[in-house]
Amino acid sequence: MLGNRSPNKKKSKEPKKNIMKVRSSRKVYLPVYFMILVLVVALVVVKYNNLSLDKLVLIFAIVFIILGVKFTEVHRLSSSYSLSPSTLTFSAGLVSRRIKNIDFFAISDIDVHQSFWQRMIGFGDVHVSLFADANVIKNINNPVKFANFLEKMIDKKRGEAEQW
């Protein structure tokens, strides 16, 4: 027999189950999407009215539309935030990845920040403080709902620890 492993004891390699996962809201990119919409409408109007359009301008417009959609989505998908039963996880990056796990016991304060326009549209930032350090969950939908849910999870985890 090699090593000290008992055949009855298996290490659990199951990943932590995420209860909630959020990304930046598409609402942040509304100005870019609006510019793309205006550009598409302008191109349709030019085509519909049989007006002449320089080929170079058409190429620039199409490239702007494609890159505008692509870069906003890549930027949005490059970071995510998830809650497991005991941790808050920040993940950032597409090619190289940075992952930061924060135990609920380390969180000292949660603040929601929304400008007037963010409140009107329904997104904002959640600031999670770790005594001296702060982390920001940027531009998520329903930040108050997320912050309240996070506080309930923290209270539940701390309540379980007090029972021990």
Image (cartoon, grey):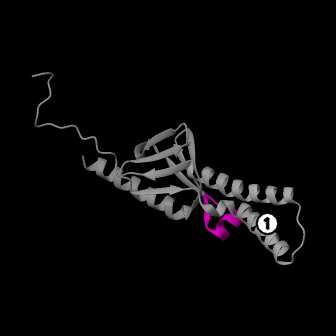
Type of amino acid under label 1: Leu
Q: Return the residue found at the far top.
A: 2
> In the rendered image of this protein, does residue 2 appear above or below residue 74?
above
Q: Nearer the viewer, residue 103 or 28?
A: 28
Asked whether 120 falls inside the magenta stretch, the response is yes
> In the rendered image of this protein, does residue 128 appear above or below residue 11?
below
Magenta residues, as a range?
A: 113-124
Q: Residue at x 44, y 60 (%)?
A: 149
Does residue 85 appear to the left or right of 56 in the view shown?
left
> Residue 156: image x %, image y %?
35, 55
Does residue 67 appear to the left or right of 3 in the view shown?
right
> Residue 112: image x %, image y %?
58, 57
Q: Residue at x 37, y 48 (%)?
A: 86
Q: Residue at x 75, y 59 (%)?
A: 62
Q: Which quadrant is home to the N terminus?
A: top left
**Residue 35, quarter of the rendered image:** bottom right
Q: Nearer the viewer, residue 51 or 27?
A: 51
Does residue 60 appear to the left or right of 103 in the view shown?
right
Asked whether 49 falls inside the magenta stretch, the response is no
> In the rendered image of this protein, does residue 105 appear above or below residue 37?
above
For label 1, the SS is: helix
Q: Return the residue found at the far bottom.
A: 49
> Residue 98: image x %, image y %?
52, 38
> Residue 159: image x %, image y %?
32, 53
Circle 1 sits on which residue?
A: 39
> In the rendered image of this protein, does residue 116 appear above or below residue 16?
below
Mark 1 Cα within 10 Å, few/some/many (few <14, many 20+)? some
